[in-house]
Image: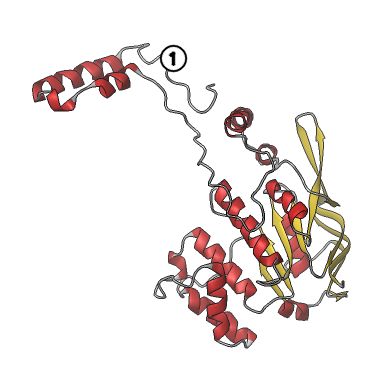
Amino acid sequence: MGVIVETNELTKAYRGRYAVQRVNLTVREGSVFGLLGPNGAGKTTLLKLLLGLLHPTSGQVRLFGEPWSRAHLARVGALIETPALYGHLTGRENLEVHRRLLNLPKARIDEVLHIVGLADVDERKRASQYSLGMKQRLGIAIALLNRPRLLILDELGRGTSTFDGLSIAWAVTEYIHDPQRLGCKALLATHYHELCRLEELLPGVKNYSVAVQEKGDEVVFLRKIVRGGSDRSYGIHVARLAGLPPEVVHRAREVLLSLESQEGAGQGEGPAPGRRPHPYRQLALFEPQSHPVLEELRALNILSTTPLEALNLLHRLKEKLSRPGESEGHGQSGPGGR
């Protein structure tokens, strides 16, 4: 199969600090290329370099076997970060702008709206009124409009809860991979390391990841792309690098360990291809705490309480809450306490 994307020693630096360093990448036709790595590791920067949205400091990009040129973009569909939409236009009108620029038949708009599940949206609704998830789907529809030979998607599922986003990314990858549906060559960037399992389940999926070096509690992003997936997202490490206070980072580690032990998170498992993902329960960040006042209220029979008794009860409960030490032992928050 022919090579769709190829980079040679591709590097991007900002004032001497590397965002992407000496990346050598080959994506062949007929494959779904999964690029995994935490926030801040350089995934989006790499995708922008492939699309010409950033100029490399050094190195080379080749698309479809030729040195990069703007003419190649006619065969590429992409969604990088937040989709660029005209907020005063409806979803269909946004697609119409791109359809005219690409000189495509009008029927293609209905096709892509159906693919992304926006066909039944009120046609009077402006894009500025869309939810974040709907805006993402409209962005994918725009990317699919020209039946691209190469599809580049950055962080599928952005703007939704963790398991919703993972489920969306999983389903979209299956859809892209299926030759009876889309069968497009795609490069997908994500920090959902659970998606690594798709390489075992779908023959055209290949995993690559941003290289990371761990030294105890320290993590160093090497700014290089290596073959294989990742079993961790390193989100808390990225938060530390972003400047979060040390006590917040430490508490976040405690909460993560507690959530993982309670919910079995981070197992790297996913649904079998074509099956609907397991309906995971939303994780509870703060468990309900017991309190004498709450217990007394729960035991109260409202129907047999007179108005005067209710006033006296409220007065007594208010005094309880005002007493020093009355709430001791009941102020811990989050899983696992302090």
Residue 21's place in the image compared with 264, above or below, is below
**Could you tell me residue 141's position as x and y percent?**
58, 71
**Camera-side residue: 319 or 30?**
30
Left/right placement of residue 138 relative to residue 327 reads right
Left/right placement of residue 27 relative to residue 129 reads right
Q: Residue at x 51, y 59 (%)?
A: 132
**Could you tell me residue 71's position as x and y percent?**
77, 81
Left/right placement of residue 267 relative to residue 164 reads right
Residue 142's place in the image compared with 101, above or below, is above
Q: How busy is the neighbourhood of tag 1: few (under 14 within 10 Å), some, or many (20 plus)?
A: few
Residue 14 shows in this picture: no
**Could you tell me residue 153's position as x and y percent?**
67, 63
Q: Quadrant of residue 234?
A: top right
**Could you tell me residue 137's position as x and y percent?**
55, 65
**Camera-side residue: 92 or 301?**
301
Q: Residue at x 76, y 45 (%)?
A: 230
Q: How many marks?
A: 1
Tell me the quadrant of the picture where the C terminus can be found.
top right
Q: How is the image coloured?
A: secondary structure
Left/right placement of residue 2 relative to residue 261 reads right
- According to the picture, the residue beneath numbered tag 1 turns out to be 329
Q: Quick one: SS at disc 1?
A: loop
As shown in the figure, which amino acid type bears the numbered disc 1?
Gly
Residue 223's place in the image compared with 109, above or below, is above
Q: Residue at x 67, y 61 (%)?
A: 174
Tell me the quadrant of the picture where the N terminus can be found.
bottom right
Residue 258 shows in this picture: yes
Q: Quadrant of residue 328?
A: top left
